[in-house]
């Protein structure tokens, strides 16, 4: 019994601890299918991002529209995912910026979009 209490207490404290690599995420419109994502890389003329197989048409349309292409990561349940996206209206485009990700299938000709995360209304 003496050993059980410290073990239970340690597991409870471990469950309540916050992870430094998982900061508070800004809220995206989850109900409509958006995800909170973090920009990991930005395509520039000097450093183009490698296109995945079957996604050339989606990349070409985004480039023709003048939209920057970014590589983002987002958390879904217990897994981290990565995706290419077109940055639409993100003024402060920098790595580490949190954005609202609207996933899409680039092999179907659609490139995901990232938008600024809307600010919560202030009361």
Image (cartoon, rainbow, N blue to C red):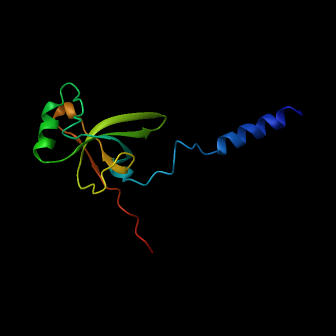
Q: Percent from the top left, x then y, of residue 111?
A: 21, 39
Q: Nearer the viewer, residue 25 or 20?
A: 20
The residue that appears at 72% across and 37% down in the rendered structure is: 11
Where, quadrant-wise, is the N terminus in this rendering?
top right
Quarter-wise, where is residue 12 in the image? top right
| Rendering coords of residue 104 (x, y %) | 25, 39
**Residue closest to the eye, 32 or 85:** 85
Q: Which residue lies most toward the left here? A: 64
Q: Nearer the viewer, residue 44 or 91?
A: 44
Quadrant location of the C terminus in the rendered image = bottom left
Quadrant location of residue 54?
A: top left
Q: Is residue 44 above or below residue 3?
A: below
Q: Residue furthest front?
A: 46
Residue positioned most to the top: 53
Q: Position of residue 14 (x, y in %)?
A: 68, 40
**Is 72 placed above or below 53 here?**
below
Residue 85 placement (x, y as % from top left)? 26, 41
Which residue occupies 16% across, 37% down? 58
Q: How many marks?
A: 0
Residue farthest to the right, as pictured: 2
Dividing the picture into quarters, in which one does residue 73 lie? top left
Along the horizontal axis of the image, is 81 left or right of 61? right
């Amino acid at each position: 019994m003496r050993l059980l209490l410290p073990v239970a207490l340690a597991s409870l404290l471990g469950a309540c601890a916050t992870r430094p690599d998982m900061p508070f995420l800004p809220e995206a419109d989850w109900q409509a299918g958006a995800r909170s994502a973090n920009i990991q890389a930005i395509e520039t003329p000097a450093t183009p991002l490698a296109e995945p197989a079957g996604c050339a048409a989606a990349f070409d349309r985004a480039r023709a529209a003048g939209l920057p292409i970014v590589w983002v990561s987002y958390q879904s349940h217990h897994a981290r995912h990565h995706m290419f996206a077109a940055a639409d209206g993100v003024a402060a485009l920098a790595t580490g910026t949190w954005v609202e990700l609207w996933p899409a299938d680039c092999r179907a000709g659609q490139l995901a979009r990232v938008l600024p995360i809307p600010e919560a209304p202030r009361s």
